[in-house]
Image (spheres, grey):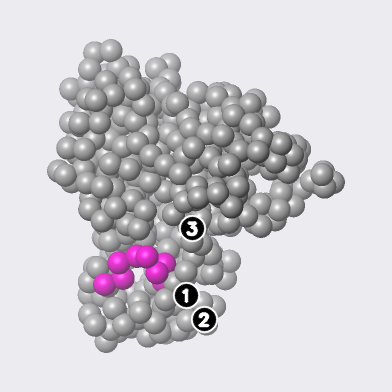
Amino acid sequence: MSNNFTSSSEVFLWLSQFINLERGQKPKSFRIDRMEALAELSGHPERCAPSIHIAGSKGKGSVTGMSAAILEASGLRAARYMSPHINDIRERICFGSSYFDEEIYCAAGNELREITEVRIPASANPLFDETTADGCEPTYFELLTLYFFLCARRGKCDVMVVETGMGGRLDSTNVLDPLVSVITIIELEHTAFLGNTISEVAGEKAGIIKHGKPLILAKQKEEALEIFRNKTKERESPLLYFPEITGISDLKIHSSGTDFTLSFSSVPQDLPLFTYPLSLYVPIPGKVQAENAALAVTAVKTAFPETSEDAVIKGLKRFYIPGRFEKIAETPPFIIDGAHTPESLALCIETFCLLYGESGVLIFGCAADKDATAMAKIVCAHFSRIFITTPGTFKVSNPTLVYEAFTAQSNKAVLIEDTEKAVKEAVDFAHSKNIPVLGTGSFYLVSEIRKLI
């Protein structure tokens, strides 16, 4: 086997050689049995600590981060797994609000490489044999997920907060048996793998619901809600449906965050949620962030009944995650947000216009599998100039088709495929008109903008 890793960057560079599901995958590579085999070969690191498992189409990263922040404020050693990253790939595999020690990343990386280079070949498992009908070498996301579990085990974590990558039922993270599952709002996404209807997508997300374990569920369209009600009934899992058990009041959205009051009602007596209202603050503007926080509070308090009001307040107040309605410049105001579905984009635009007014500048780019036409209909009326560009190279994109979708709605759009040039021209235009800038449509675009500003 190769020499031991000496840094986390070496581990991630080694990992990059494997098939990257985020760049495109074969149908036979999207399955769960291979991940189960990897977990067994590794001594089941996914069982090293209790967990909270989070799926959904939008908001799952914020809920994951907020849950981990509350747990950390409670004094627990919380490992956090989420994607994508904005600045540093270690954001995907975190210890509390920061990173694991380099020694942990390196030791877990050495173990991961030993698994792939020694244990997998020795197992002769046909699941990993490319020449068989169902075989496929381990994918990037499978190995990244296993790497997280190995880091959590070596870091002696008390709890893991884990976000799914895609879907739920067949997602690599679904080897977990969590204390609670959380499902955020469902939209049509990844239709080639998850289905072409809300019901089909919901069915895939519902795959994370475990027998007898509570499901914390965000507000859903009726067809999705029916799927989740049926699945929780089938698996005898308590259902805590956001509109039925929580109330958000005294909502105040401002440029530095969101204040709100959270209260619970109609909660089953055996579930230990707060019996009195909580006055809370999250340092991200937007009603949706208050709702994400409510899901996180519900999940953590359900999984860990001893969680105090003080830990909730401190955790949410300290919470930080890049690329979620983040202000990266003051003059002119420059906001970046990873909204990449029609509904999340609509909420982002609503918050942006509430705080900064209409007729700003938009920098937009999205992956090829997104509904550019639907998003163009949402945003075009609210901006005086729209710069269409490339959302990085991590995912396949087609800026020309996106530009055509936008020009069908408005004559305000211009196409500048070079992201650096698009950002410079957008900022120059905003300066000349003294108007704000919003960059959105993809976390990968947000990452590129953040590097440039």
Q: What is the quadrant of the N terminus in the image?
A: top right
Disc 3 element = loop
Disc 2 element = loop
Query: At 82% across and 47% down in the image, what residue appears?
Result: 2
Circle 2/circle 3 CB separation < 8 Å: no
What label sits on residue 213 in the rendered view?
none
Q: Residues within 10 Å of mark 3 (few under 14, many from 20)?
A: few
Of the residues shown, which amino acid type is indicated by label 1? Answer: Thr
Q: What is the quadrant of the C terminus in the image?
A: bottom right
Going from the N terminus, do you reach mark 2 or mark 1 first? 1
The alpha-carbon separation of the residues under discs 2 and 3 comes to: 26 Å
For the magenta stretch, what is the residue range? Answer: 365-373
Query: At 44% across and 30% down in the image, what residue appears?
Result: 52
Task: Please tell me which residue lies in front, 442 or 205.
Answer: 205
112 over 345 or under it: above or below:
above
Q: Position of residue 439 (x, y in %)?
A: 42, 68
Q: Is residue 372 magenta?
A: yes
Circle 2/circle 1 CB separation < 8 Å: yes
Residue that numbered label 1 is attached to: 390
Going from the N terminus, do you reach mark 2 or mark 3 first? 3
Disc 1 element = loop
Residue that numbered label 3 is attached to: 25
Of the residues shown, which amino acid type is indicated by label 3? Answer: Gln
